[in-house]
Image (spheres, rainbow, N blue to C red):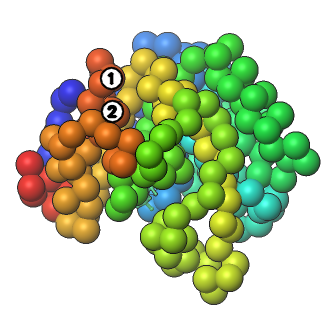
Amino acid sequence: MIIRIFNTREELDRYAAQFYIDTIAAKPNATLGLATGSTPIGIYEKIVERYKSGDVTFVNVTTFNLDEYVGLPPENEQSYAYFMKHHLFGHIDIRQDRTYLPNGMAADPAAQCAHYDEMLAAQPVDVQLLGLGHNGHIGFNEPDAELHGGTHVVQLKQETLEANARFFSSMDEVPKQAITMGVGSILKAKTILLVVKGADKADIVKRALQGPITTECPASLLQTHANVIVLLDQEAGRNL
Ligand code: F6R
């Protein structure tokens, strides 16, 4: 595991954007695993800037997002499909039919999950971007006695609902379920880029990277992966 701590978030975001540009330069048809939430927004901004400068093209790139809320259509501004369009896909030359997210509106969620895993198996992820939840979740794999390997429907924990509530006008509107890639699917990525920002995540960063490997902290399973790069700002890395 490589851990890099940056003086500023700006430097971190630039570094991550460059990492993606280098990945695509080396493999123009790369498969990228993407995340939503506040952490990657700055990275996506930098990627869009670099695209507009002509430094990268996404015409042959495929993307898979980690997760999507159940019950929100892509037009809903709180859906992750909308988020991705707003922050990244709408600004770059990626083919929209190569940007995959779990379908939170699927009539048969179990079939949708199986289909997502089949697509992931056919186009394995080269670089998976991850944020980190305060409770150690990755994707929406919440701490539990057992974890799922593959894509599945998850009941979000109270602390996650509360963290997500900041994007909704009331707590009642926050979806209680999501479809997420499982920890097994995440660990299949060739390289994992874990990005964490902010003092409020310093404790969970330490647990995830240096604590025991346990399903009660799903991110701790990243310690078993051969190629994880962790990008932290000073605040998130202050307990290491
Ligand atoms: C988002 C995701 C989540 C977030 C995590 C951190 O696709 O899968 O695991 O990465 O909840 O969220 P932020 O970045 O908002 O602190």
Q: Is mark 1 within 8 Å of ligand 1?
A: no
Q: 3 left or right of 174? A: left
Q: Residues within 10 Å of mark 1 (few under 14, many from 20)?
A: some
Residue drawn at (81%, 44%), measured in percent from left and top? 109
Residue 190, visible in the rendered structure? yes
Look at the numbered disc 2 and give the secondary structure of its residue: helix
- Three-letter code, disc 2: Leu
Q: Work out whether residue 223 or residue 50 is closer to the camera in this orientation and state it.
A: 223
Residue drawn at (53%, 22%), measured in percent from left and top? 125
Task: Report if the CB atoms under discs 2 and 1 are less than 8 Å apart.
Answer: yes
State which quarter of the image contains the N terminus: top left
| Percent coordinates x, y for residue 128 in the rendering | 46, 32
Look at the numbered disc 1 and give the secondary structure of its residue: loop
The residue identified by callout 2 is 222
The residue identified by callout 1 is 225
Residue 131 against residue 158 in the figure, above or below: above
Q: CA distance from mark 2 to mark 1?
A: 5 Å
| Percent coordinates x, y for residue 34 in the rendering | 53, 40
Residue drawn at (72%, 42%), measured in percent from left and top? 102
Instruction: Find residue 105 and name its label.
Output: none
Give the total number of marks visible in the rendering: 2
